[in-house]
C-alpha cells in the first residue's frame, strides 16, 4: 500500500466509544467556550446533550464564527459534515438551521445552530466560500425548507425539479401526500414539455440552441420548462 | 492537474514456452518485468472551435442509477459538468416523521441498498443514543460482524461494476460470486438477502442461528483468495492502470474542503475514518489499519477499497473469536417487546406489547447526530425528538451525495471517456443520493 500521508494524521490519544452518555450535561466541547470568548454577544446559548455540544449563534455572526473555526489553528474545523434544518411540530417554535462541523485534527464534533423566527424572512449566510462541500447541502436545505442561503452562487432546487410549484416538502405544513391530487399530478406530468430537459444555461453551450428546429425553439423559450 | 506518477504494470499476452505450453509473457522493453506508465499530460491548450453539449443519463448503465450529467465538451475534453439528480427522490425524511422509530428501519434498507444492514445498524445506534440505551456486549460484536460483511459486499459491487465500466468483465463475475456467499449468510441470519431490516432499537431482529459462525469462518477462509485473484487481474493490469491513474485527482485540502468521506478522502491522503476517529461499537478495540493513498486519483481509490476489504476480513476474524454469549437485546421494557408466549398468556405482557406496538416507544426530548463509517463514507443520522414516539426530524447525511457534489471539479479537464471512470470511482448509490 501507499505510504500514509502524515500531515492529516490525527494526533493524540485514540478515542474510545462513548458509553453511558448523560441526557443533559457532561463534558462540553472546549470550542463552545472559545467561540463565546472570541465573539462576545454572538453566542446566544450552548448546551451539551448526549455528549454533543450545540452552540446557538447569532444569525449575523454565523459566517464569521464558522470562518474563525475553520481558520484558527487551535480550532481547525476543516470538515463540514452536514447542513440541514429543523422545523418543530409546535408551530410557535422557531425554525433552526443546523451545521455539523468536525475537526479531524483534534477529533472534535460541534453543532452550530441559528434560530429563525417564521415571521422573518428565512435567510442565513452561506458558508459555501469556506467549505465547497456546503454547495449541495445548502441547495438541498433550500429545496426542502425554503431557507435561503445568502452568498450561495447557484441556489436552486436540487432534488425536486425547478418548476415544482407545491412548496417545500419538509415543512410541517406540507401534507405527506403532496398538495395536489394524484389526478392533478398526472395531468401536470403529461402536459409538461418533454423537450425542455435542458436549462437555457445548458443550451447556451455550443450553440446547441441555434441548431434546434424553429418550432422547438419557440416552445423552449416559452414558459413551459420542466427544468429538471 | 495531472500528477507525475509511475506505476509498474505487467503487460501480458499469451505466448508459448519451450515445451509449447501457453504462458504469460511480459511485454517489456529492456529485459525487466514491467513497463512504466505515466500519468497523462496536462490539459492541452484550448484549440478553439465550437463547444459541444453531451448529455449522459439518466438512463445510462455507466451512471450507476439515474444520474444525469450534462457535459460541455471542447473536442473530447470536458470543460464543464452540470449534474442533475433527484430522479429517485421519494421523501424518506418526510415519511420518517410519520413513523415510529422501529418502523423507519425498513426505509433505511432502501436508501443505500448495497449496505442495507449497515444502514439498519447505523439507524439503531442513533436511536439508541436518543433513548439513552447501552446495547449488550453480544449485540455489539454481532453488529460489527454484520457491518463488515456489508462493507465487503458493497465494495465487491463497486469493484465489479467499475471493472465493467472500464472494460474488465471477469472481476465482476468473481466479485458477485463472493457477494452471493455474503448474501447467503445474511439470508441465514435475517431471512432476507437484500432488504434485511435486521436491527432494532436496542438489539437485533434475531440472534445468529446455530452453526452460522462456521459458515462465516468458511467465508473468511475463501474470500481472501478471491480477492487476491482480483488483485492479480487488476492492480498491475496495463489497461486498468492506464484508465485510472491520474484521473479525478483531489488534493488533501480539496478533499476536506469538499467534505468527501470514506475511501474518497482516504485516497487523497487524509486518514479520516469514523471507525477510528469517532469510534462506535467498540471499534477502537479491534486491530485494523486505515489504508491511505497519496495521489488522490481513481487508481488510489481502487487500492484503498481493496485494502479495506482485507482489513474488514481481519476485523471479522477478531470479532468471531471474541463473540460473547449472552442476550442480544437489552433488558429495557421501553423498547423491547415481551416474549410472544407471554404476550398471549399474561395480561400485563399483552398490554405492554400492545402499547409498544401501537403507540411506540417515546424517547426524551433531545437531538443527536450519530455517524458511522459506511462503505461510501461518513453516513450520519440526525434525530430530533420532541418527546413523541415519532421523530420531529430525521435527517440522513448521505456520503455519496456529498462525494458526488465534487464531480464537476473532478472531471473538468479530463476526456469524456474518463468521466465514466471518475464517476465510477465515487461509488455512488442513487437511492441514497436522492432518498
Image (spheres, rainbow, N blue to C red):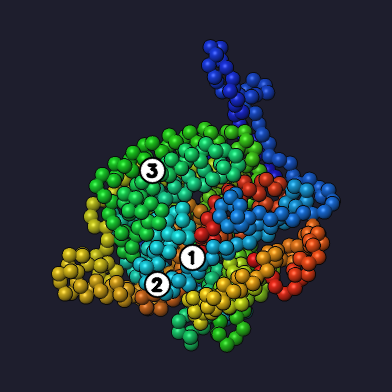
**How much space separates mark 1 and mark 3, taking CA atoms?**
29 Å
Q: Sequence order check: which comes first, mark 3 or mark 2?
A: 2
To the question of a shared chain for discs 1 and 2, the answer is yes
**How far from the left and from the top, in percent, is residue A199?**
71, 66
Mark 1 belongs to chain: B
Crowding at label 3, few (<14), some or many (≥20) Cα neighbours within 10 Å?
A: some
Look at the numbered disc 1 and give the secondary structure of its residue: strand
Mark 3 belongs to chain: B
**Residue B63 visible somewhere in the drawing:** yes
Q: Is residue B143 above or below residue B368?
A: above
Q: Residue at x 37, y 72 (%)?
A: B100
To the question of a shared chain for discs 1 and 3, the answer is yes
**How far from the left and from the top, in percent, is residue B353?**
24, 71
Q: Which mark is residue B181?
A: 3
* Closer to us: B322 or A222: A222
Q: Which mark is residue B99?
A: 2
Q: Sequence order check: which comes first, mark 1 or mark 2?
A: 2
**How far from the left and from the top, in percent, is residue A118?**
55, 85
- Left or right side of B137 for B155: right
Amino acid at each position: 500500500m501507499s505510504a500514509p500521508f502524515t500531515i492529516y494524521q490525527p494526533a493524540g490519544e485514540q478515542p474510545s466509544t462513548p458509553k453511558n452518555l448523560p441526557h443533559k450535561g457532561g463534558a462540553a466541547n472546549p470550542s463552545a467556550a472559545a467561540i463565546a470568548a472570541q465573539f462576545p454577544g454572538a453566542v446566544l446559548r450552548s448546551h451539551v446533550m448526549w455528549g454533543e455540544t450545540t452552540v446557538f449563534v447569532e444569525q449575523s455572526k454565523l459566517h464569521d464564527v464558522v470562518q474563525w473555526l475553520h481558520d484558527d489553528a487551535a480550532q481547525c474545523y476543516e470538515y463540514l459534515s452536514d447542513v440541514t434544518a429543523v422545523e418543530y411540530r409546535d408551530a410557535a417554535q422557531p425554525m433552526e438551521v443546523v451545521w455539523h462541523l468536525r475537526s479531524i485534527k483534534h477529533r472534535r464534533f460541534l453543532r452550530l445552530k441559528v434560530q429563525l423566527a417564521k415571521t422573518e424572512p428565512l435567510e442565513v449566510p452561506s458558508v459555501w466560500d469556506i467549505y465547497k462541500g456546503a454547495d449541495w447541502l445548502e441547495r438541498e436545505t433550500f429545496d426542502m425548507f425554503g431557507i435561503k442561503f445568502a452568498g450561495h452562487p447557484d441556489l436552486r432546487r436540487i432534488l425536486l425539479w425547478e418548476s415544482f410549484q407545491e412548496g417545500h416538502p419538509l415543512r410541517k405544513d406540507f401534507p405527506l401526500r403532496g398538495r395536489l391530487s394524484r389526478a392533478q399530478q398526472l395531468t401536470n406530468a403529461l402536459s409538461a414539455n418533454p423537450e425542455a430537459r435542458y436549462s437555457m444555461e445548458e443550451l447556451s453551450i455550443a450553440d446547441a440552441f441555434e441548431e434546434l428546429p424553429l418550432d422547438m425553439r419557440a416552445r423552449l423559450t416559452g414558459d413551459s420548462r420542466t427544468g429538471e | 492537474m495531472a500528477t507525475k506518477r509511475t506505476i509498474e504494470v505487467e503487460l501480458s499476452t499469451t505466448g508459448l514456452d519451450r515445451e509449447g505450453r501457453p504462458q504469460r509473457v511480459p511485454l517489456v522493453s529492456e529485459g525487466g518485468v514491467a513497463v512504466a506508465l505515466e500519468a497523462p499530460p496536462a490539459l492541452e491548450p484550448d484549440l478553439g472551435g465550437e463547444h459541444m453539449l453531451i448529455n449522459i443519463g439518466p438512463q445510462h448503465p455507466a451512471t450507476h442509477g439515474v444520474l444525469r450529467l450534462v457535459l460541455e465538451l471542447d473536442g473530447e475534453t470536458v470543460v464543464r459538468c452540470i449534474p442533475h439528480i433527484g430522479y429517485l427522490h421519494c421523501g424518506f425524511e418526510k415519511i420518517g416523521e410519520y413513523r415510529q422509530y422501529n418502523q423507519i428501519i425498513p426505509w433505511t434498507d432502501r436508501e443505500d441498498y448495497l449496505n442495507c444492514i449497515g444502514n439498519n445498524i447505523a439507524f439503531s445506534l442513533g436511536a439508541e443514543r436518543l433513548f439513552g440505551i447501552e446495547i449488550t456486549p453480544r449485540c455489539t460484536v454481532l453488529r460489527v460482524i454484520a457491518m463488515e460483511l456489508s462493507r465487503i459486499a458493497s465494495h465487491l459491487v463497486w469493484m465489479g461494476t467499475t471493472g465493467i465500466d472500464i472494460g474488465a468483465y471477469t472481476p465482476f463475475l468473481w466479485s458477485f460470486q463472493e457477494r452471493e456467499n455474503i448474501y447467503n449468510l445474511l439470508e441465514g441470519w435475517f431471512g432476507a438477502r437484500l432488504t434485511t431490516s435486521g436491527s432494532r432499537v436496542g438489539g437485533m431482529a434475531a440472534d445468529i442461528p446455530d452453526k452460522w459462525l462456521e459458515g462465516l469462518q468458511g467465508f473468511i477462509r475463501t474470500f481472501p483468495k478471491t480477492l487476491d485473484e482480483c488483485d492479480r487481474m487488476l492492480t498491475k493490469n496495463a489497461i486498468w492502470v492506464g484508465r485510472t491513474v491520474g484521473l479525478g485527482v483531489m488534493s488533501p485540502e480539496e478533499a476536506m474542503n469538499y467534505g468527501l468521506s470514506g475511501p474518497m478522502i482516504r485516497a487523497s491522503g487524509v486518514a479520516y475514518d469514523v471507525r477510528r476517529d469517532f469510534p462506535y461499537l467498540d471499534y477502537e478495540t479491534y486491530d485494523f489499519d486505515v489504508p491511505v493513498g497519496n495521489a488522490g486519483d481513481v487508481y488510489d481509490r481502487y487500492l484503498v477499497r481493496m485494502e479495506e476489504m482485507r482489513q474488514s476480513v481481519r476485523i471479522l476474524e477478531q470479532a468471531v473469536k471474541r463473540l460473547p454469549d449472552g442476550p442480544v437485546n437489552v433488558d429495557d421494557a421501553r423498547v423491547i417487546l415481551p416474549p410472544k408466549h407471554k404476550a398471549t398468556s399474561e395480561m400485563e405482557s399483552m398490554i405492554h406489547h400492545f402499547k409498544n406496538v401501537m403507540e411506540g416507544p417515546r424517547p426524551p426530548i433531545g437531538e443527536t447526530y450519530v455517524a458511522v463509517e459506511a462503505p461510501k463514507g461518513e453516513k450520519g443520522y440526525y434525530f430530533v425528538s420532541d418527546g413523541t414516539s415519532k421523530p420531529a426530524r430525521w435527517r440522513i447525511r448521505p456520503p455519496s451525495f456529498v462525494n458526488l457534489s465534487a464531480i464537476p471539479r473532478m472531471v473538468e479537464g479530463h476526456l469524456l471517456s474518463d468521466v465514466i471512470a471518475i464517476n465510477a470511482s465515487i461509488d455512488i448509490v442513487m437511492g441514497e443520493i436522492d432518498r
